[in-house]
Amino acid sequence: MGDYKTTWPGAAFPRRSFLKGTAAGAAALTAAGSGVFSGRAQASDWSGETLRFMIINPHAGSIKPLSEGFTELTGATVEGVKVPYDQITAQSTLDVMSGTNDIDVFQYWYVDKEALVRDGVLADITDRIAAEEADIDPADFLGALYDTYTLVEGRRYGLPYDGDTHVLFYNKEILDRNGLQPPATWDEYNAVAKAVTDAEAANGVYGALLMCKQFPIILCSTYANRLGGYGGDFLDANGAPALTSDAAIGAARTMLEAGPSAVPTPLETEFGNSIPVFLSGGAAMIEFWTDLGTWAQDANQSQIVDKWGVVPMPVAGSNTVNRPAMNAGWSFGVSSGSHNPEMAWEFVRMSSSKDFHVRVLTDNTTGVDPTRRSAMPAYRDFAPLQADAVEQAIDDAFPWPTKPESPKLMQSLTDELGSMMAGDKTVEQAMGDAQASWEDILG
């Protein structure tokens, strides 16, 4: 999902130089030096023009390659504007609805796409995509990413940039010295976490990192991992809330039961402060975005090189099929208020192109995970220990709700899960209240 080294100022690990030390990185660097886009005719010359794009803080490391790539392609000057991931939808909406129109291209979370379209923030780029479909090659996108990230009522509003889901990372040394195996079920996960914490908490080592900070993209990801494990969904087949189903209740209970064995305290644990703990050997397991493996194997920032492994998300109950969730997931779209929609479209197209995707995918400072099947050979060279698990996870991932009301829905669920984790509500109370809230929001 992101480059925590550029995002979290307290991190103690130095940044890795661009694409250092991998075959895929060397190839991409060679391509960058000779012109990544040299095989494609330059569509427009935007010399003297300035393009401004908004991007989440965890993708701050993407600003340099995006800016350099677009300048190389068009001659334009590029400015990237970083914002916190929990504020990007609000800031994008404000830029357009206030009439400021300072930004040409917005990065957006797929869960919020229909709200952004409803509010007139994103421009319809369906016809632009259709005109260049052969070059864009929508069939090359992994799994359900293309439609899930870009489609609203038959029209397209962006192109995928970062294919996000979670896999389960574990510390081999910690499990080995406690005679434990990586879990295949969520019950096994809780048992492994408890065993490690009981044995090693006195030495500052815990069974798991449980991200429950009360941001939807954090806390609901932790919940969605377990919901998928039980074979459940947020909504039923008719689009109605399903938060009191057996799967939904089981997922919440399993998450609550993991809390006592996690690094203190889950309600304060999130993207940035969990990574240094895992990379320093302070936790046996973490469910996390797939780029964590590239950091874990980087000796410049990790104390667990060759001491970690990765497995698919556990299953639970009667479900036996690994079913990861689309946790996060980012695209770029053209602002409806862009001063130069043609130039903005050119940027969106470049950011999602096959060549450029390899360029940012094989750089562990960008925060980009796979979106394209054609990029997987380069990714396997770059991240061989995790590539197969990552491709399977993204191929099989199920989406969160993408209704116009989704921001309100996910915030409501976050509030209820937070109350549950704090001990203020039982599982049944929290999920019952979330169900009632969703029914009220959806009418």
Image (cartoon, rainbow, N blue to C red):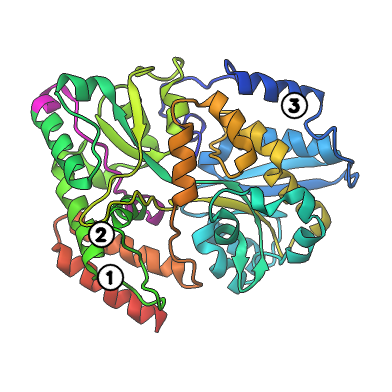
Q: Which residue is mark 2?
A: 417
For residue 195, what is the image quadrant?
A: top left
**Height in image: 433 above or below 146?**
below
Type of amino acid at the residue the image marks with label 2: Leu
The residue drawn where x is 29% and y is 62% is: 415
In primary-sequence order, the first of circles 3 and 1 is 3
* Label 3 Cα neighbours within 10 Å, binned few <14 / some 14-19 / many ≥20: some
Nearer mark to the viewer, of 2 and 3: 3
Is 173 situated above or below 263?
above
Disc 2, disc 3: CB below 8 Å? no
* Separation of marks 3 and 1 at Cα, in angstroms: 49 Å
Which residue is under mark 1?
Answer: 434
Q: Which residue is mark 3?
A: 32
Q: Amino acid at mark 3?
A: Ala
Report the residue at 49% width, 55% height from top.
87
Outermost residue, bottom side: 443
Mark 2: few/some/many CA within 10 Å (<14, 14-19, 20+): many
Provide the residue span drawn in magenta: 199-219
Asked if residue 272 lies left or right of residue 263, the reply is: right
Q: Locate residue 319: give its quadrant.
A: bottom left
Q: Position of residue 298 (x, y in %)?
A: 46, 19
